[in-house]
Amino acid sequence: MTEKRIAVEKLKNQSELDVREIMSSIRERVKEHAADQTDSRLPFVPQATDFSGSDRKAGELLHSEELRYLNQHHTYSLESYRPDKITSHRKFLGKFIVKLKRKMLSFLWENLLKDYFQAEKEFQSNLVKYLNDSSKYIDSRDAFIFWDLIKKVDTDVNRALERIERINDEQTGTLVSTERRVINSVNHALEQLTKLDTEYRATAAQVETLESVSRGLERILSKVTRPSDQVSLPSNSEKKEQTSSDIDYTYLMLENRYRGSEQSIKDRMSVYLPYFKNCNASVVEIGPGRGELQTLFVENQIPSYGVEMDQAMVEACKEKGLDVRLGDGIEHIVSAEEDSLGGVIACQVIEHLTQDQLVNLAKACLRAVKPGGKIIFETINTESMVALARNYFRDPTHVFPLHPETMRFFLELCGLKVLEVKKLSPYSDEAVLQELPVEEYMTPRWAYAIETLNRNIRRLNELLYGYQDYCIVAEVE
């Protein structure tokens, strides 16, 4: 191409053209080129391609600026080679020179340049078309490779995620199974511990009962085997008091077996001390039993004495140095002088009385106790089904169970001012129905169901395992 351009330039600059010489030179060169069959192209050597330093991205060839330029400029106008475009600035020889150049250019165009430029135009058109097709192919191939790579990456990621999920499910299943086994083992161990604790408590209660019974039997045996002081006085044998062999110890033994230890009863009865702390007159206890409350009164320097109908109980209290008198408590209060007593208390007594006896006792207390003095009656709580079934009906001497509101009504009807009704002796947490725990992992539906069940359990505990006893505190106005 360079030699042809040089030849063309020489033709333009020469004033006189030798056409035959030019054509002869061209033919010689064509013959030489045809005779030379060797391939002058450089051999193809594949090399590793490094795109790391290139700014060209995949898919940009088809829309590149270079390809756009080639598409717009691969053809060029031949207007500059038209004969009528040849002019001259010379005034005299210009016309002759212009004619000569036009004729020579027309000759060259028709015999040589026209075919060459046409071939060149076709070559460039095919080359640009080839470049367009190559760009489309390369971009399509790159896009296919890219999306195929994306698909492969997506497939590999999905497989990895599936494997991770499968491993996670297996691990979770193993963990849940292990957790369930551990929970079952712990629950079983807790059940065994609960059983052992229940058995221990039951055994401890039985041992405490046996100790109380044994101590009571020892006292009874000591009284039975003690010689009577009245045997040496036969002249007064018809007037002697009831001897130890004539005393009925049945209720004392019943008290020792089911009442509980004396220390536990003392601890439970300490709640009554504040009501009589500042009494300046004697407090009468009706039915002191084994004397637990009287012992507390003595220890706290509260003036008091007891009135007991059971001879065995009286002797048991006198052995402890307590002021307990044999007699009917109601009759004693009735016969007492007006406003002579600092207070009256009867624990587990009024359930042994009839309705008339209870009314008479309340009216007698109203007359005999000083204004401001306290009157306290303790009995079994009938609102607790278990206490009613176990405690009330276990004693055959009980007459009628008394509801707290019934007692309030009787005392207020008799003229006493009821201060409070105090519930006593709650069941231990281990003895009542147990609530179910609400765990964090539970769904709201299960949590609500368990809460509802727990509310029913609490209401059932109040009905079955309410306080075992209650006391009603009244005051003389």
Image (tube, rainbow, N blue to C red):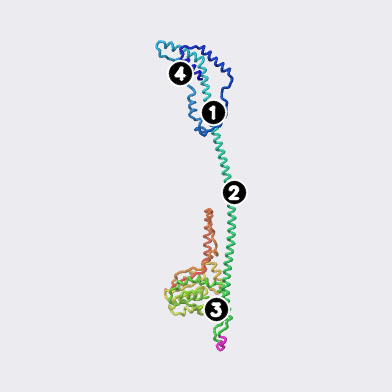
Q: Indicate the secondary structure of the residue bearing disc 3.
A: helix
Give residue 80's mark: 4
* Span of residues in magenta: 230-237
User: Rounded to the nearest whole Å, what is the CA distance between mark 2 and mark 4?
Assistant: 84 Å
- The amino acid type found where label 2 is placed reads Glu
> For the residue marked with disc 3, what is the amino acid?
Ala
Q: Quadrant of residue 85?
A: top left
Residue 223: image x %, image y %?
A: 57, 80
Secondary structure type for disc 4: helix
Q: Earlier in the sequence, mark 2 or mark 4?
A: 4
Of callouts 3 and 2, which one flags the residue occurring earlier in the amino acid sequence?
A: 2
Q: Which residue is mark 1?
A: 134
Q: Main secondary structure of the magenta part?
A: loop
| Numbered tag placed on residue 170 in the rendering | 2
- Mark 4: few/some/many CA within 10 Å (<14, 14-19, 20+): few
Tell me how far mark 1 sits from mark 3, CA to CA: 125 Å
From the viewer's side, name the closer residue of 275 and 318.
Answer: 318
Residue 312: give its label: 3
Whichever of callouts 3 and 4 sits on the residue coming sooner in the sequence is 4
Q: Determine crowd level at label 3: few under 14, some 14-19, many 20+ residues with C-alpha closer than 10 A.
A: many
Q: Tell whether label 4 touches label 2 (CB within 8 Å).
A: no
